[in-house]
Amino acid sequence: LASTEVKKEPSHVRIADGVVIGGDQVVVMAGPCSVESEAQIMESARAVKAAGAHILRGGAFKPRTSPYSFQGLEEDGLKLLAKARAETGLPVVTEVINPETVDLVASYADILQIGARNSQNFALLKKVGQCGKPVLLKRGMAMTIQEFLMSAEYIMSEGNQGVILCERGIRTFETATRNTLDLSAIPVLKRKTHLPVVIDPSHGTGDHHYVAAMSFAAVAAGADGLIVEVHPDPEHASSDGPQSLKPKKFAAMMEKLKLFANAA
Ligand code: PEP
Ligand code: MN
């Protein structure tokens, strides 16, 4: 269902009034890795909106590598995201980590995010395939493009065609960056599938110093959007502080991004 052999025209995934992923506009999703408090998510939402972002990101259920790390505010976090949406008008993307909470997360979110660690959790993929909300599907850190597309098929074959693919870096021998961002996935996916392709330069590099450069490269290579971690106080973030941009840096990046849009 995802293949260009079945459908040639690019798919446009409609999120809200005026926000369509896969069309002419490069759509930017931005916000903190985790929702931490009302003040933190409100400040983040206002800042990313002022800088020109289209969608607010923030994790309420966090799939942490260690069980001792911050696991997220759960439903309280979802409520704070809904509050930030009500104030700023920004639609919300947030992660869902198991089939049992899909209905709950879908009742708050505009886009359901499937994380890299869950990208082959087939029970979860089937469940989000039945929920009717757009899905941002991340590529697993050791997943081939073909496997990535098969995960998209799991969602689509349940009836949900609103799938957005997200490259977020893969595991290689390189340790200078957290992951190796596979920018070649953009033209490869564009040839194989009609689904929109979004790049996550934050998890892709793990270091805020490299986020702007990878964002420009991704847009120049034809990405339909970006998902970027932005935090008002990265030094004290509950998760992913080192890769989070401060609002000022994010605003500067958004300004420069205009130079690269529609380059591919
Ligand atoms: C995230 O978006 O904060 C996240 C956990 O991403 P990934 O699943 O790509 O690691
Ligand atoms: Mn994160």
Image (cartoon, rainbow, N blue to C red):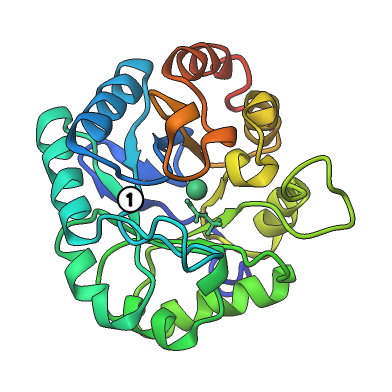
Q: Residue furthest right?
A: 173
Report the front residue among 33 and 7. 33
Q: Position of residue 182 (x, y in %)?
A: 75, 50
Q: Decide: is 229 above or below 12.
A: above
Left/right placement of residue 221 relative to residue 261 reads right
Which residue occupies 20% across, 29% down?
39
Horizontal and vertical percent position of residue 176: 83, 40
Assess disc 1: are there few (<14), some (14-19) or many (≥20) residues with their C-alpha within 10 Å of its C-alpha.
many
Q: Is residue 118 above or below residue 243?
A: below
Q: Which quadrant holds residue 2? A: bottom right
Indicate whether 260 appears above or below 172: above
Q: Number of labelled discs?
A: 1
Residue 131 appearing in the image: no
Where is residue 103? Give x, y as percent. Answer: 19, 74
Q: Amino acid at mark 1?
A: Val
Please say if 120 is above or below 37.
below
Residue on which the image places disc 1: 93
